[in-house]
Image (cartoon, helix red, strand yellow):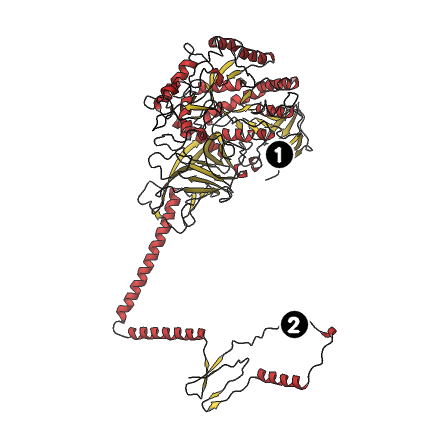
Amino acid sequence: MSLVIAVRIENISQVVIKRSGLTAIINQKCYRDHQNHRNHRDHPRSPRSPTAISPPQSPKPNPSYHQPEILQLNEDSHTWKIKATKQQQNIQKSNKSLQFCFGKLQSYLKTENAFEFRFKIIVAFLFLLICCIVMMTRYFHYNLQISQALHDQILMFKSQKKITFLNDRGDNLVDLHFGLHIPNDINPFNCRSISEDDKICFDWKYRAHLSVKVSRKKFTNSFGHNETITCYNHYWRTYQKYSALKDCFDMNNGYWFGMGDIYNIQIPLNKMSVEEQPFITSHNHSAILSGSIIDRTWYSSHGVMINVPLDVPLFVSINSSEDPNRLCLISKKNFPYYMNNQNSYFAHLHYSICLAQSITTLQNYLFERNAHQQQTVTVNEKSKQQPLIKINQEQDVENFFIDHIIWSTNDNVLPNFTQQNVQSYVDQITNYGFGGIILLDSRWENSIGELRMNENVFNTPKALINILHNKGFKIMLTISPNVDLQSELVENANKYIMLDQYLQTPLMTRCTNNLKKLCALVNFTDVDNRELFRNKLNQQLLNHSTGLSVDGLYFQSIRSSLLPRYINYDHNINPDQFVEYLNRVIKSLHTSVGISTSVVSKNFTGYAQLYPRDSSWKGLQSIIPSVLSLGLIGYPLVNTGVVGGKDLFTKIKNDTGYINKELYLRWLQLVIFTPVVEFAEPPGGNDLDVIKIAKRLHKLRSEHFMPKMKSALIEHQHKGSPIVRPMWWNEKSDNESLMINDQFMVGNDIVVAPIIEEGKTERDIYLPRGWWKDEILAQVIRGGKWMRKYQVPLDKVAFFIRTEPSLTLPIQKNEITKTKTKI
């Protein structure tokens, strides 16, 4: 057994090992250490004084230090050798193996088969080279195909599951992160060779399938310039039951707009934070995405439009905790989307991404596309289709609401709803010097859903309508899709009413005019019922010979959150489809109409009413973003609701019975510039000062604003441009105006900057480029800059009319204006 003696050697100068014995020459350092030890023993140092103590010095590294080596006695017990470390042993073994292999290879090459072996090596090398060339060629060819097919407007990052959309100059417009529901370690199969019509085709085995098709169209925008609209249509489908599909868009590359009248909406949408929620019409304001008039359309300031059809069970998140700075579209078969139809377990996600030079071009394009799709309004799908209202008829219908103020009735205005009190209400309005449209609430009906005048309220309905017409007023009636449970229609339980498919009993829901009351619901999913409902409206209410000959109808539509949960929708899974069925009937009526709920504009002719606002400053501040959003998605005429808000007669009045004058006046100053104005009583009630200001504003509206609104309305009917426009509408490259959400434009020639904060009499105002006439200071101002701390008294509203420099009006000096600052 070998005896192993380990000796630590530092800076050994020489080690000599002889067979006859062990002879070692000691290291010089070891010798010095020995001498130092002896000197220390013979001459010990005196103890140091406390003042002589020096701080400990860190040891200096010794460059000559090596890892300790091990001496091992050989088997002859007389000689010694240095034992290799484990690492050195492994290296020695590897070297021996390589030497053995190379030696064997050299010996083989010297044999007679050397030529054959060399040939095989060359063939194998060429085969691997060809494989690499084929793989690289296929990869680059695939990317080239995509680039050529999409005209170099996208960049595909397959491993990252990301698509970057580019404009004609190669600038980044938006990044799409697709397939976020699929694990990153699963690679897709390129199925484009199977489906040649798809420009992009990916298939994740047993999970999901994605195909992208491209369409292009030449389009002339509202400025007369020719552009090419490129749309990428994405089609997702899943192979797994109850699984979700999820795609997200980065919001960092631009400012985003759209969605419609969402509760507490903020523009741009980048300011909002919404966790994943279903995107349907809802009355529940605890949900951030609740609203009555919505649209699945989003716009980016970089010229990107996203549109999702109604048949997708859509969930939306914006700046969520899971996906910050992203707009995410999620499709899954969860409540509230119905699942009692075919293929109800498998989700699908369809959407289109359209690219253009600006939002205005995309908005005009969407209007033209909807007009093409709506060449006819299908009321009875079994019969021939009915043509749309022509443009000149549209002008008459829509000018009807611009020309007239709406005066609505309710329980607070007319607690005792009788024919005599209605006439007295009209006389009171006339005495204050106003006219317009009388909108009767749902109490006019004998029973909700029967569409007949209440004989207990109106003794002679036709006579009342003739009297109001002679006084210069128009008449509108409130219509509900509900049916009273005491009605004969419910007692008969026929298919006109929505029934339980098993029990054949009426499905009940909350009444639209009174949420505390239960009603039945007309089954608008049935084609025959839609035709029957339309005929009843025409014959009993609109016909001049057989009906009441009213001038218009306001539809208090139901929202999806109030629908019965279990409805047989056949192939439809979106509860908002019920709202669309009702709106098909409304759009086919040749009369002036208003709606409170909608999911697809489709060039709607009439006004859309915002959900009732709280009578508060917060409610007032939410009006402008909603009006601007609805204008972008295709609703030019927006009724902001009763001046003062829904709680005008409860919260806004103080102990003396008078309203909050400041809030009411600021509310009125904003609404007077919108296309549709509605009051619930003479302005200000008994406050003569408020009535005086209201009459002055109404005169101003008639003389200056209404001609501009009608001119903008004509532009909308041809190109789809909104009447009330955001500040950036004509300034696409002006980033300053993209963040403004408290002022707006009427057409291209009026800038309105109302006060919407309590106690304020000044504000900052931004004017676009050009020359503007200040109607308060009677001065001409150069635009393209901010006006800081502009004074606006309580009885005034700041608005500016586009003009040219004139010698008759003073030009404002530089001390009031500031230079434009960038965001």
Say which amino acid is labelled 2.
Gln
Residue at the spot of label 1: 785
**Which percent across, then down, holds residue 115?**
27, 70
Residue 329 image position (x, y, % from top left): 44, 39
- Describe the element under mark 1 as helix, strand or loop: strand
Q: Position of residue 209 (x, y in %)?
A: 35, 43
Q: Is residue 465 above or below residue 56?
A: above
Q: Nearer the viewer, residue 113 or 164?
A: 164
Please indicate whether residue 108 sits to the left or right of residue 147 in the image.
left
Among numbered discs 1 and 2, the one appearing first in the sequence: 2
Mark 1, residues whose alpha carbon is within 10 Å: few (<14), some, or many (≥20)? some
- Near-viewer residue (307 or 458): 458
Of labels 1 and 2, the one closer to you:
2
Q: CB of mark 1 within 8 Å of CB of mark 2? A: no
Lateral position of residue 493 relative to residue 804, left or right: left
Q: Could you tell me if residue 221 is visible in this image? A: no
Q: Nearer the viewer, residue 173 or 564?
A: 564
Q: For the C terminus, which image quadrant?
A: top right
Please name the amino acid that badge 1 sits on. Answer: Lys
Q: Which residue is mark 2?
A: 57
Split into 4 quadrants, where in the image is the N terminus? Answer: bottom left
Q: Is residue 312 visible?
A: yes
Q: Residue furthest bottom?
A: 20
Relative image position of residue 533 (x, y in whole percent): 39, 19
Q: Secondary structure at mark 2?
A: loop
Spatial CA span between label 1 and label 2: 68 Å
